[in-house]
Every structure is written in structure tokens, then in C-alpha cells.
RNA sequence: GCUCGGGUGGCGAAAUUGGUAAACGCAAGGGACUUAAAAUCCCUCGGGGGCAACCCCUUGCAGGUUCGAUUCCUGCCCCGAGCACCA
């Protein structure tokens, strides 16, 4: 008998990775594929540390799904690219003192090697990097389209400024008042910034969610981020005839509004301030402005404020109520002014208590319940004609009543702000705008794109708030494309999230240099069939990508307005309870594991760790279990091949039943990303086969195919051992016979009064009367029933019988 | 504070619409093989009682609904995530 070769993952993995590359196994025909399936995963930013275990977990899970779909007969396009622009890459380059344009390609090389080594089914023909001029040319084109559509505008705005990174940060990049990247407290600065009018799409972004087949957690995060509030604008008039508009979600409580509060920056403050209060008001405004964003947003929330010395009329009661300014009212939300109802709002209550302002209860409360009460299902009181009306009815009726005097309008307010896309940095696509003294703001003509990012030595940002690009005159000065006069380039670059907001459109069309995305390719492959990624991008990337897609659809460039109809959020792999990061020093590098155990074992182990959509703490204790399992499969197939593929067909029917049961389980579990339980049932199947000493071709071939998405290299090798030529991925996923899968014997529970007293093995699907005759003959049952009358019988087929006595 | 997840053996975890709690794997203990070790194979493995057949208890805590609750309801406790003076 010849020797069976031992399982050597290193050599077979290298063999098949080479095979795939040489035979173009992972490259579907993008123009003719009959069943296109676009399997997308979130492209990484190529950090110097390389991919960590968390990245591998995400990519492996998505890759398994793609390979599974491939085996089901789809033409799976699984591209990969690099999100290489942005602050993360740039900071590393700054630290090394080397231009990121030189550094990034090295990192990409490492990433590419790791991604191949782990066995991803990537179509490398369509690799992209957002930093290639051939890519960002179209990112700039995108900006121009938004500009022309009036969706890009510039305004001077209080922005988040990071004094360490010396750049403006998007709201999303500020965590607890600190810079997401370097944890420095963020300051307030006033700079001219480019914004995209995503707020125009707030309602549509919300409504459209209903069309999405997404993880519910992601949908929810996005909904909260958009933050829709229904309410009304109410007008409070001053004796001088000025009208102060406030936004409230509780117009029903207007009778309880005992004072007004304006944001310190509110435009009406100056003219409404009484002479004698002027000094105090100015002082307070200065105090607020000098506070940095941290102090105002997350600092201690003790209420401060100043009475401005004038009054306005409550539109419901007609009373004159005092006007205050306080920094707990924010200029950027609502109208920058509120009516304060201290009896029914916590913040107003706190403020009123502190400054001894009147508190008037207008919603009935339960006995002894202290104010403030914020319930929306109360009944109104002290509210004139509206006494006794429920809050919800009252809100509507009071708005109608005030609207007759043009003092109220129903209104919807969103928390979402416009997207600030400019960055005063070097490492990004220059915003394609030219300033001309005679023509004003002129977009760079599309024929002149890309505006290339020059390779410069001093790319270090400084604290002027102007990009380093402004220091390069030969780049900075340019002819105005309209009048030919002296113009100047915009020196800001755009946010990385603009790069990633459209990358899925580029992948299938990477070879076209004269268009961002080819019409035919796009129609064939998009929208993306399946998208799998991290929930950390629920409100950034995933929202921006939806917005950009809607804009492109509205402008006639796309026929769909939803880029990712199906999205699944995977869990996060942490280490010792914390997210992996270089600064925490808890990064687990996958390479050593892959070297020691092989990519197949490592992939499967990551998926066996727990539910893919939940993630968890990384540890390596159980990895040997997966290796043992693969060894068992290896030997079973090798032994069978020795015997001419016949092997022992012992176990007969029971094993065939188990096989079909397993196919059903693995199919549904893989489809629903329950990879851990799919692997467990493959293990059960292999264990049973070994117990029976069986190993025929008809039992093993389906096993090898089911194993292929999880452990593609060993599956390829064993497929070859079984005598096939060509890739296992040309095979078809095994089908199962529902009847066979659901046949065989089951053990059912026999309970007396809900307590387990006996078990019976019966054929699956046995009817109640047949089961009962066996139950009543059972010794344990006789003993417990003991002549008592059976009052009730509960029968659940294939599960249990419960006798109530 | 608000909104979501989650809490099950020594560990990672399983458990269709409420229906045998702990599948699968790791670790541990015992045994076989071996001069020995590794590898491999077999057995045990939630807690307690019993010689045994068996019995009692057990899914964060306290109640409730039900023939029956890890699953549903109410109130708490703890952990994680997101938002956070958003009117």
C-alpha cells in the first residue's frame, strides 16, 4: 500500500494560489457573465502595520460568502482596493518624514501579499487605489457634478480644529470632544469650508431605509444619526415688532413657556439687548466664544446664561416673558432659539431653578410626582381652552390655533448637518476649484481633470489653516479657465469619505480612462449584490455612499439610488476587551498564525470563534481543534482515494440521511452567515462518518465542496485527489433531498406535568396516536402516572409528549 | 441621561414558532499504544445526592404568564456599542 502524503498546508496553499492566478480562476467575464454577483467588502486603508486579525476576520467572512455564491453557480466579482488617502496615512508619513506617495505603495504591497496569502477570491485585475490619479480624477469629477448641481457650497463656519493634526475635522471625527486620531481636545475655529448639502436629502435618506435589506443595528444607528424630530416653529413677538422663531417638539406645552432662550450667537441678540444689559451680554458672549468645543459640548453642564433685558409675548398666553441667552441653546440646531418650559423639560427646569424663573405646570402629573415631568401621554392643564386635552391632540390643536394668527407652522427638524468635505491637508485629492478675481468661483473644466496632487517635500500642515499646497506657487497660480486671467487654485483637499463614497462604482470599470464608470458594466454589476463590513461605518461611509448615489441618480448618471441594497454588519474582533490598535499595543498579527497553521485552519478558526455578526475577544486556544478537523478530512479522502474512491459504504441509510441533513444545515447557515454552526455540523458529519468507518466518494465529495468556501486550498487539493481536474469552484454546491434530510429517528421527551421523565426513540414524523401507545407502555411513565387520571396530553411532533395528571 | 446589543459549564459557544439546556470545539482528568515523548485512539467531564436504577438543583437577580420559559411580560443589577445641553 502506498503512503498517503501528510497534510502540509504551506505547500498546498502556495500551489493553489499560484494555480488560481495562472488560470484566472477568480476573474469573471465582466461583460458576459450570465449570473453576476457583486460581492463587496470594505476596502482597507493600507497602514504600515499591515492587516491585523480584525481585518482578516472581516475579509474572510465576506470571502466565504462570495465563494459560497460561486459554488451556487453565480459569477462572483470580488474586488479589492485601497483607501489610501487621508489623515491616517498622512500622519504616518509625517512621523516618518517621508512623502506618503512613496510610503503608501510599500504598504499596499504588504497588504496585497497578506490578502493573497489568506486565500481571498479577489479579482486583482480590478484592484484600485484612491490615491491613483486615474481614480481621484473621478473623485474630482464627482465634486464638480455636485458643485454644478448647487449641492456643494462654501461658507465660513465654526469648525472643529485639531491643534495637533492642524486640520479641520468633520463632526464624525470628533469623539467626546477629542480628535479621533490623536485624542487632542478639539478647538473652535472659523474658516471657509466646502460643504455638501446632504441635509437636502435627510428625509429621503430616512424614507429610503425601508428599501434596505440591512442589519437592523446599522439601520438604527443611521436613523438616530439623521435624527428626525417632528414639531413646530412658534413665533414670539417683541414689543418692537421683532419676531423670534423657536423650534419645539412640544407645542402642546406652550402655555407653560415662561421665558425664551437664544443661543449666544443668535443674530437678534444685539438689537434686542437693553442698554443696561449690554456689558453683561457682551461679556457672556466672549466667555462662550473663548470656551473650546470640549467645554461647551462635554464639559460640565452647569447652566450659565444672561438676561438680555427685554421681553417677548407668549403667543398662547399673551404674557410678556423674559429673553435670556445661554450656551445650552445651540445655534446650529433648530432656529437657535427655544421657548423654555421648565415644568416639563429637564434642562429648562435646571436653568429656571438656578436663575429663579417662574415654573408653570401645564401637564397633569401623577400624585406626588415631582417636576419636571416630560411625558408625552399626559393631559393638559393651565392651558386655557385646551385643558383636559391629551398632549398629542393638544399639540396639533394648538399649532392649528396659533397658525390662524400666523404664529405657528408645523415643522420637521433633523439632527444631521451638512457634510464638511474640505481638509487643510496635503494627502488628498485637491478640490477642483479655481478662484478668479473677475469670474469668482470656477470649477476646473472636466477636460482639465485630474488636478494632480504635486509631489512636494514640505507636505507638513501648519497652523495657518491653509493647506501646504498654497506654499507652491507654480501649482497655486493658474489661468482662469473662463477668462484666461490670473487665477488661484483651491488648496484644500477633499475628505477621504468622498473617495470611499463611490469606489463600488469604479471597481468594475477600472480599465476605462475616459469615464468614471462604464454604462454597460454598471448596469450589469450594480447595485452591489452583497456588502459586508463593519458597523463603525454605519453613519459615515454608509450614509455618504447612499447620499452620493442619490445625487448621481438625480443627475441622470445612475439608474438606481441605493448603492448597497443588502448589507450585513460583522462583529468586531477585540483583544483583551479593547479594539485592536497600535497605540494600545494589542494588535494581533495574522501572519505568524498563518505560517504555523496554514491559511485554511486560520480562516476556519476565525469563523469558529463565535457568530460572525457578533465578533468577540481573540484568543488562540482552540485553533488546534480546527487543524485536527482538517487532518481528519484529509485522511478520510486520501484513504478513500487509495481504495479507488470506493471506500467503505458502511452506515448505509443513516449516513445518507446525515449527509442530507448536513447539506441542509450548512447551506442555510452559510447563507445566513452563521459560519460557526455550519462548521460544527461539518464536524459532526465527519465524526459520524469515522465512527461508522465509512468513506465512499458519494459521502466525501459533497463534504469537500461544502468545505471549499471555508478552507479553499485543502478543498482544491482533495478535489484533485478525488480525481477531478480543474478547480473545485467549478463544481456545484450539493443539493439535498428534503425528505431524506428530515428522515431517520428522533429522540422525543416524555414529560409528566412538565417534568422530564423518560425519552423515546421514534421515527421522525410519527403520529400522536402511535407515539401515545408507546408512551403509555413505558415503564417510567406507568410509575409516575401511577393510576392517576391523565387530564390533558400535549403532543409536539418530533419533540415531546407532556401528560398532565 | 437616551437608544440599541448582550449576560448560558473551567473557556469559546449551541438550542426552528415557547417544547429533552449545554450540540461542536478547547482545556482538564483517566486509559490504550510507545523504552520515552509527541501524534493518534478510547472513556469521563454543569452542581449535589445515591452501590445502583434513579432523584433534586441549574441559563445575571426578583416576580409573573404557561402543561412547559434560555426564549414571552414587569421591575432591577452588570457588561459592551452608539448618541449626547438636538429643544
Image: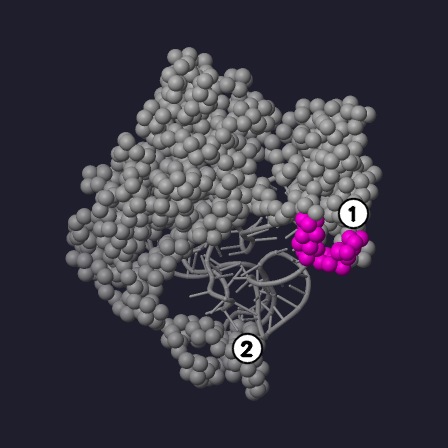
Q: Are marks 1 and 2 on the same chain?
A: yes
Image disc number at residue A776: none
Q: Secondary structure at mark 1?
A: loop
Q: How is the image coloured?
A: one colour
x, y percentage for residue A707? 31, 52
Count of numbered circles in the view: 2
Q: Is residue A386 magenta?
A: yes
Quarter location, residue A19: top left
Q: Label 1 is found on which chain of the structure?
A: A
User: Considering depth in this image, is A424 or A385 the residue closer to the camera?
Assistant: A385
**Left or right of residue A614, residue A367 in this image:** right
**Left or right of residue A785, residue A274 in this image:** right
Image disc number at residue A752: 2
x, y percentage for residue A662? 34, 61
Q: Does the rendering let one see residue A29?
A: yes
The residue that label 1 is drawn on is: A317
Q: Does the rendering let one see residue A116?
A: no
**Residue, x 56% and y 25% (percent of image)?**
A156
Q: Is residue A124 magenta?
A: no
Instruction: For marks 1 and 2, give the CA distance.
Output: 70 Å
- Number of other residues with Cα within 10 Å of mark 2, as a class: few under 14, some 14 to 19, many 20 or more: some
Counting residues from the start of the chain, the first of labels 1 and 2 encountered is 1
Q: Secondary structure at mark 2?
A: strand
Q: Which residues are magenta?
A: A378-404
User: Considering depth in this image, is A496 or A422 the residue closer to the camera?
Assistant: A422
Q: Label 2 is found on which chain of the structure?
A: A
x, y percentage for residue A754? 56, 74
Q: Which quadrant, please, contains the C terminus of chain A?
A: bottom right
**Residue, x 64% and y 34% (percent of image)?**
A331
User: Considering depth in this image, is A286 or B41 the residue closer to the camera?
Assistant: A286
Amino acid at each position: 500500500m502506498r503512503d498517503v502524503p501528510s497534510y502540509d498546508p504551506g505547500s498546498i496553499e502556495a500551489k493553489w494560489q499560484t494555480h488560481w492566478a495562472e488560470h484566472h480562476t477568480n476573474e469573471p467575464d465582466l461583460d458576459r457573465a450570465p449570473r453576476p454577483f457583486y460581492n463587496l467588502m470594505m476596502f482597507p486603508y493600507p497602514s504600515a502595520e499591515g492587516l491585523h486579525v480584525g481585518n482578516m476576520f472581516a475579509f474572510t467572512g465576506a470571502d466565504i460568502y462570495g465563494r459560497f455564491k460561486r459554488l451556487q453557480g453565480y459569477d462572483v466579482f470580488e474586488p479589492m482596493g485601497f483607501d489610501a488617502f487621508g489623515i491616517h496615512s498622512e500622519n504616518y508619513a509625517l512621523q516618518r518624514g517621508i512623502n506618503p506617495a512613496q510610503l503608501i505603495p510599500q504598504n499596499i504591497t504588504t497588504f496585497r501579499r497578506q490578502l493573497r496569502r489568506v486565500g481571498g477570491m479577489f479579482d486583482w485585475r480590478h484592484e484600485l487605489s484612491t490615491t491613483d490619479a486615474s481614480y481621484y480624477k473621478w473623485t474630482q469629477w464627482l465634486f464638480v457634478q455636485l458643485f454644478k448641481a448647487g449641492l456643494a457650497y462654501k461658507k465660513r463656519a465654526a469648525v472643529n480644529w485639531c491643534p495637533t493634526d492642524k486640520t479641520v475635522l468633520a463632526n464624525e471625527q470628533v469623539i467626546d470632544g477629542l480628535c479621533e486620531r490623536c485624542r487632542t481636545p478639539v478647538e473652535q475655529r472659523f474658516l471657509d469650508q466646502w460643504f455638501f448639502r446632504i441635509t437636502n436629502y435627510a428625509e429621503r435618506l430616512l424614507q429610503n431605509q425601508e428599501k434596505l435589506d440591512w442589519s437592523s443595528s446599522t439601520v438604527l444607528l443611521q436613523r438616530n444619526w439623521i435624527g428626525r424630530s417632528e414639531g413646530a416653529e412658534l413665533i414670539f413677538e417683541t414689543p418692537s415688532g421683532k419676531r423670534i422663531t423657536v423650534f419645539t417638539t412640544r407645542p402642546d406645552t406652550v402655555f407653560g413657556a415662561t421665558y425664551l432662550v437664544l443661543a449666544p450667537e443668535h443674530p437678534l441678540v444685539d438689537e434686542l439687548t437693553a442698554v443696561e444689559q449690554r456689558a453683561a451680554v457682551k461679556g457672556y458672549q466672549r466667555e462662550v466664544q473663548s470656551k473650546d468645543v470640549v467645554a461647551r459640548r462635554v464639559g460640565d453642564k452647569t447652566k450659565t446664561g444672561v438676561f438680555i433685558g427685554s421681553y417677548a409675548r407668549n403667543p398662547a398666553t399673551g404674557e410678556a416673558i423674559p429673553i435670556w441667552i445661554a450656551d445650552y441653546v445651540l445655534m446650529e440646531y433648530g432656529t437657535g432659539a427655544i421657548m423654555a418650559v421648565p415644568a416639563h423639560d429637564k434642562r429648562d427646569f435646571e436653568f429656571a431653578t438656578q436663575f429663579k424663573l417662574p415654573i408653570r405646570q401645564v401637564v397633569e402629573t401623577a400624585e406626588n410626582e415631582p417636576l419636571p415631568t416630560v411625558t408625552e401621554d399626559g393631559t393638559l392643564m393651565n392651558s386655557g381652552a385646551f385643558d383636559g386635552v391629551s398632549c398629542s391632540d393638544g399639540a396639533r390643536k394648538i399649532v392649528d390655533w396659533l397658525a390662524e394668527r400666523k404664529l405657528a407652522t408645523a415643522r420637521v427638524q433633523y439632527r444631521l448637518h451638512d457634510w464638511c468635505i474640505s481638509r487643510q491637508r496635503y494627502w488628498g485629492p485637491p478640490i477642483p476649484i479655481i478662484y478668479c478675481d473677475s469670474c469668482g468661483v470656477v470649477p476646473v473644466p472636466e477636460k482639465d481633470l485630474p488636478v494632480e496632487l504635486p509631489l512636494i517635500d514640505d507636505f507638513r500642515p501648519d497652523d495657518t489653516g491653509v493647506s501646504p499646497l498654497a506654499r507652491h506657487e507654480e501649482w497655486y497660480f493658474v489661468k482662469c479657465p473662463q477668462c484666461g486671467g490670473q487665477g488661484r487654485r483651491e488648496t484644500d483637499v477633499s475628505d477621504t469619505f468622498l473617495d470611499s463614497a463611490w469606489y463600488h462604482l469604479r471597481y468594475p470599470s477600472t480599465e476605462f480612462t475616459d469615464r468614471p464608470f462604464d454604462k454597460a458594466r454598471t448596469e450589469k454589476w450594480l447595485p452591489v449584490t452583497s456588502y459586508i463590513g463593519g458597523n463603525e461605518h454605519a453613519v459615515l461611509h454608509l450614509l455618504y455612499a447612499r447620499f452620493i448615489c442619490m445625487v448621481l441618480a438625480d443627475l441622470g448618471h445612475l439608474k438606481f439610488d441605493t448603492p448597497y441594497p443588502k448589507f450585513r454588519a460583522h462583529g468586531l474582533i477585540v483583544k483583551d476587551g479593547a479594539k485592536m490598535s497600535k497605540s494600545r499595543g494589542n494588535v494581533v498579527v495574522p501572519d505568524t498564525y498563518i505560517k504555523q497553521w496554514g491559511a485554511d485552519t486560520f480562516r476556519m478558526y476565525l469563523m469558529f470563534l463565535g457568530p460572525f455578526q457578533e465578533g468577540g475577544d481573540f484568543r488562540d486556544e482552540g485553533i488546534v481543534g480546527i487543524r485536527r478537523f482538517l487532518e481528519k478530512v484529509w485522511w478520510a479522502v486520501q484513504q478513500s482515494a487509495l481504495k479507488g474512491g470506493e471506500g467503505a459504504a458502511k452506515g448505509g441509510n443513516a449516513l445518507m440521511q446525515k449527509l442530507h441533513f448536513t447539506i441542509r444545515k450548512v447551506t442555510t447557515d452559510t447563507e445566513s452567515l452563521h459560519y460557526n454552526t455550519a462548521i460544527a455540523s461539518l464536524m459532526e458529519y465527519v465524526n459520524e462518518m469515522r465512527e461508522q468507518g465509512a468513506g465512499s466518494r458519494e459521502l466525501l465529495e459533497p463534504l469537500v465542496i461544502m468545505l471549499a468556501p471555508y478552507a479553499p486550498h485543502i478543498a482544491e487539493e482533495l478535489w484533485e485527489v478525488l480525481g477531478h481536474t480543474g478547480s473545485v469552484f467549478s463544481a456545484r454546491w450539493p443539493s439535498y433531498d428534503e425528505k431524506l434530510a428530515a428522515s431517520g429517528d428522533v429522540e422525543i421527551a416524555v414529560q409528566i406535568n412538565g417534568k422530564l421523565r423518560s425519552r423515546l426513540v421514534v421515527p421522525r414524523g410519527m403520529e400522536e396516536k402511535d407515539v401515545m401507545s408507546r408512551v403509555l407502555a413505558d415503564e417510567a411513565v406507568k410509575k409516575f402516572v401511577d393510576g392517576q387520571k391523565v387530564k390533558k396530553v400535549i403532543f409536539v411532533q418530533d419533540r415531546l409528549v407532556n401528560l398532565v395528571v
